[in-house]
Amino acid sequence: MEPTTRSSTVVKCEKHGLHYDSAKTGGCVVCRRESGELPPHRPGAAAAGSGSLPAALAVTGVLVAATTLGMQMLHGTFTTWLRETGNPSAYESGNTYQQQQMDGVLQELKEQGGDDGAPLPEGEGEEED
């Protein structure tokens, strides 16, 4: 790829130091704006007048809703598939596992303690011969 060469009509504005094509325009953009050839620069005018923000928000909302629906359907299908594999630990939630652990601990405490499940102090509750 060869480097691009500038046309001989590209000159530098002496007042502002900007380059412009003298064959196409009569001065740099700042000079043309000052002379009234171009309308004055309005910061943010393109963004405010374009009206694209509501459309962008609507598209984003539709995409979020479609993604959520798709993920819910995929989750349901995946959970069903896991249950059909016959491995219950593959689809049990962490709460189920924790509940089983707590049930085991409570059973041990009941076996060690009295009727209410609270452990008895040492020496009490032991049967005498």
Image (cartoon, grey):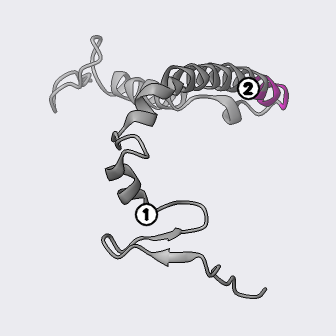
Q: Position of residue 105 (x, y in %)?
A: 40, 30
Image disc number at residue 28 = 1
Residue 9 drawn in magenta: no
Residue type beneath disc 1: Cys
Q: Residues within 10 Å of mark 2 (few under 14, many from 20)?
A: some
Residue range highlighted in magenta: 78-85
Provide the secondary structure element on which disc 1 rests: loop
The quadrant where residue 10 appears: bottom right
Question: What residue is pinned by disc 2?
Answer: 79
Pick the residue in front: 60 or 125. Answer: 60
Which of the two marks, 1 or 2, is nearer to us in this view?
A: 1
Q: Determine the residue positioned at 43% across, 63% down.
A: 28
Q: Position of residue 109 (x, y in %)?
A: 34, 27
Looking at this view, name the residue that lies furthest to the top: 115
Residue type beneath disc 2: Thr
Pick the residue in front: 81 or 121. Answer: 81
Provide the secondary structure element on which disc 2 rests: helix
Q: How many marks?
A: 2
What distance separates the C-alpha of mark 1 from that of mark 2?
A: 66 Å
Q: Determine the residue positioned at 53% across, 26% down.
A: 52
Pick the residue in front: 44 or 71. Answer: 44
Looking at this view, name the residue that lies furthest to the bottom: 2
Q: Relative to residue 46, is residue 62 drawn left or right?
A: right
